[in-house]
């Protein structure tokens, strides 16, 4: 019960602190400002940790949104979906489609987004 209340309070604070269609926030390491950045997806990882996906970049905070770190994997395809199991373990799914082919590409991080590795599924596209 206590966990559910904390989760609901965290989500309420998240909605109150920024308009989820656009944000203004500081980023690490060079203190650039994210101004009027469109947010396409976001999620709560733990009490003080959140991730957010903009049109082209993935950010994480471990201090309730005071400072955001760009943890984007360096792949040229657009991000389809993001999931973090905890502060360290996360997955990013890429999807691309042409007239003749659909491609899914999954990467994971074991260090909170410092590095990303492809996940080999063994399945054909």
Image (cartoon, rainbow, N blue to C red):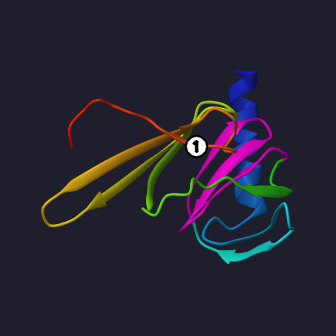
Q: Residue furthest top?
A: 1
Q: Quadrant of residue 116?
A: top right
Q: Residue furthest bottom?
A: 36
Q: x and y percent of residue 64 in the render?
A: 82, 48
Mark 1 crowd level (few <14, some 14–19, many ≥20, 10 Å Cα): many
Q: Residue at x 63, y 64 (%)?
A: 20
- Please tell me whether residue 110 is drawn above or below residue 60 in the rendered image: above
The quadrant of the image that shows the N terminus is top right
Nearer to us in this view, 68 or 19: 68
Q: Residue at x 74, y 65 (%)?
A: 18
Q: Name the residue carrying label 1.
A: 116
Nearer to us in this view, 65 or 28: 28
- Please tell me whether residue 1 is drawn above or below residue 46 in the rendered image: above
The quadrant of the image that shows the C terminus is top left
Q: x and y percent of residue 7 in the render?
A: 70, 36
Q: Quadrant of residue 48?
A: top right
- Residue 45 covered by magenta stretch: yes
At numbered mark 1, what does the secondary structure look like: helix, strand or loop? loop
Give the magenta range: 40-63
Q: x and y percent of residue 56 in the render?
A: 55, 67
Report the predominant secondary structure element of the magenta stretch: strand
- Residue 117 covered by magenta stretch: no
Residue 21 as seen in the image, left or right of residue 95: right
Q: Residue at x 42, y 62 (%)?
A: 77
Nearer to us in this view, 116 or 104: 116
């Amino acid at each position: 019960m206590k966990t559910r209340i904390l989760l609901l309070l965290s989500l309420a604070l998240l909605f109150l602190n920024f308009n989820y269609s656009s944000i203004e926030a500081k980023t690490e390491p060079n203190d650039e400002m994210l101004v009027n950045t469109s947010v396409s997806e976001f999620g709560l990882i733990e009490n003080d940790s959140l991730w957010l996906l903009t049109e082209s970049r993935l950010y994480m905070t471990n201090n309730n949104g005071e400072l955001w770190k760009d943890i984007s994997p360096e792949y040229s395809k657009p991000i389809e979906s993001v999931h973090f199991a905890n502060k360290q373990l996360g997955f990013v799914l890429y999807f691309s489609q042409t007239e003749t082919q659909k491609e899914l590409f999954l990467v994971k991080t074991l260090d909170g987004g410092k590095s990303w590795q492809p996940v080999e599924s063994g399945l054909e596209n």
